Every structure is written in C-alpha cells, then in structure tokens.
Amino acid sequence: MTCSEFDLIRHFFTEQAIQRADVPVGIGDDAALLAPPSGCVLAVSVDTLIAGVHFPLDTAARAVGYKSLAVNLSDLAAMGAEPAWVTLALSLPEPDETWLTGFAQGFFDLASEHGVQLVGGDTTRGPLSITVQVTGFVPLGQAVLRSGAKPGDGVFLTGTVGDAGLGLHLYQQPPSGANNDATMNLIHRLEFPVPRIAAGLTLRGRASSAIDVSDGLAADLGHVLTASGVGADIRVKQLPLSAAYCSLAPADDWQAAVSAGDDYELCFTLPAEQEAATLAALDCDCTRIGEISSSPGLRWWDANDRQLTLNNAGFDHFITMGK
C-alpha cells in the first residue's frame, strides 16, 4: 500500500476516533484543544513499546494496538484518574494496510470501552515502535499516590499475578503436550491486559497508596514502600494465582509470579477501617496479601512463618526479551 502520512492518519485513525464534548479541537490542527472539568487536576502518563523489547516481533497487530493503550490506562487507574484523551506516535518500517487495520481495531476497541478520544499524534518511518500518552483527570486532592502507605495498612492485589510472565515464556517456548486452554489463557493475559479503571475510581478517598503491577509485584510494591518510607510483610500462600498458572508453573513457584511483569493489576494499601467497604465496592476479585510495617524492607513469609528469600528482581527495561 502506498499512502502519504496524511492519508494514513485520516484513514486509520481520524475516522475511527470517538468525539468527546471536552475536545473543542482534535486531530487536524497544529495542536488539540482540551477542556478539563473544573475542580480537577490532570493525570498524564506516557509509555513507549518497542518491538522485540516490550512485545515479540510476531505479536498480532490487534494485540499490539490494544496493549499500547492498556498499559497507559493502567497507570491512570493506579492514580484513581478517569481517562479522557490520548495521543499516539507510531514508527513503522512501512505502511502495511493489514497490520494497521488490526492495530487500529485493538486500539480503538479499548479506547471506545473507556470513552477515550484520540486527539493527536505522529507517524514516521523506522523500526516498529509505539508511543502513547494518555491524559485523564481526578478531583483535586483525591488522586491515589504511591507515598501514602502507613504501618498497619493491609496490602491488597486485584486479579492474579504471574500470568503474563508465564504466558510470554510459553509464547516463546511452547511446551509439548501442554494444556492448550491454559496456555492460550496465559498468552491472552499477556497480550490483552485489563486496565482496572473502575477499581481505581473506587479507591479514591479509600486507599492510602496504589501502583499498577507492570514490572512485577516485588519491584512495584518496592516502589510504594520507598515512596512511603515503610516496609511490608507478604504471605506467599495468600498470593492470588490463576488456575491456568498453577496448572503449568512448577509447584510453589511464587518467585516467578511476583517477579514477572506485564500483569497490570493494582497493588494498593488500605487502612483497616476502609477494608470491608472498599472490597465490597470493587468490581473485580481482590486479595489481601500482607501488611505494611514500620520496619523497612519487603519480606516474604511462608505458611509456617519462615522468612523466604526472593532471588528475582523484576522486569528490567534494559534487558530485552528473546526475539
């Protein structure tokens, strides 16, 4: 397919963007004009996904489009922000109509689900990479930060952990005779993570801190502890693991589950008086996995109160995945 940058933008992106009332000027001018609600602050997140680093080179285009937006929405969810607008910068080796059709479908399906409008972007020729910036809003003083955890708060986790990491391993090294349904479920979790937007909105005014699990539970919870100046004690038997994970992972392989990235669940802390009401209000499964402590550090405990050693550190952006 031969097309100019303007033809590409118009055909694959402008025509599929939803229209929000708070966007006086969107795609088509030198810059977008946005009208945030009164009494709110903006929450802004940007991520770049590089082929062969953040996703395998042969990942389906629809999955790439979906995930490029999902990972940014997950950041807003962790802040308790409502998403509204997104920009997209896309570098392509060449304009491939089939690939762009799938990418746009995945991207706009998720954007429509959460009422997000594409308001600008850029395209260029080069190795495949996608940079997405998503902007949302949250009432002044209600954003959930990493820095508010207090000793005695419970540590909670939405969904399950470890699925995406095991899914990537199975994608790259398909085992013979494996449970096909479980394998496909784990790969789906890798390619189509669910941003916990509704859960994040529920945590406003309730959670003392929150973070999305992008680089692995151990690494991301560590960021919360550092920002809050506290420690935590986590019970490994309370870690939520999916049936698919348990059927294919080595027995008691909790270390891989807390070290692998790409789960995009929310890890958050709650004061005791907020636990019952918050858990009842959440729209997804949630598990209490431990407690915040005044003693610095992240500690892992087995069912017999023996302290365990974690040997894996979490995802490193400067270590590329196998191609």
Image (cartoon, grey):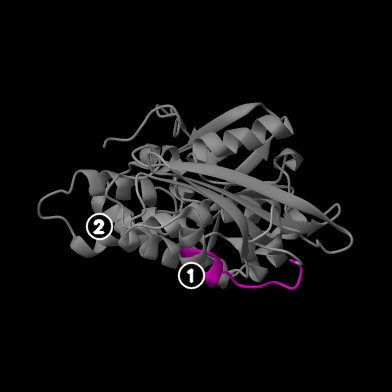
Residue type for callout 2:
Thr
The quarter holding residue 84 reads bottom right
- Outermost residue to the left: 176
- Residue 300 picture location, percent across and down: 50, 35
Quadrant housing the N terminus: bottom left
Quadrant housing the C terminus: top left
- Residue 221 as seen in the image, left or right of residue 137: left
Answer whether labels 1 and 2 touch (C-beta < 8 Å): no
- Residue 74 as seen in the image, left or right of residue 12: right
- Outermost residue to the right: 39
Per the rendered image, the range of residues in magenta is 12-23
Dot 1 lies on which element? Answer: helix
State the residue at coordinates (68%, 58%): 29
- Residue 234 as seen in the image, left or right of residue 236: right
Up/down of 169 relative to 15, above or below = above
Of mark 1 and mark 2, the one earlier in the sequence is: 1
- Residue 188 picture location, percent across and down: 34, 60
Residue that carries the numbered disc 1 in the rendered image? 109
Residue type for callout 1:
Asp
Do we see residue 259 in this rendering?
Answer: yes
Residue that carries the numbered disc 2 in the rendered image? 183
Q: Nearer the viewer, residue 206 or 220?
A: 220
For the stretch drawn in magenta, the main secondary structure is loop
The quarter holding residue 227 reads top right
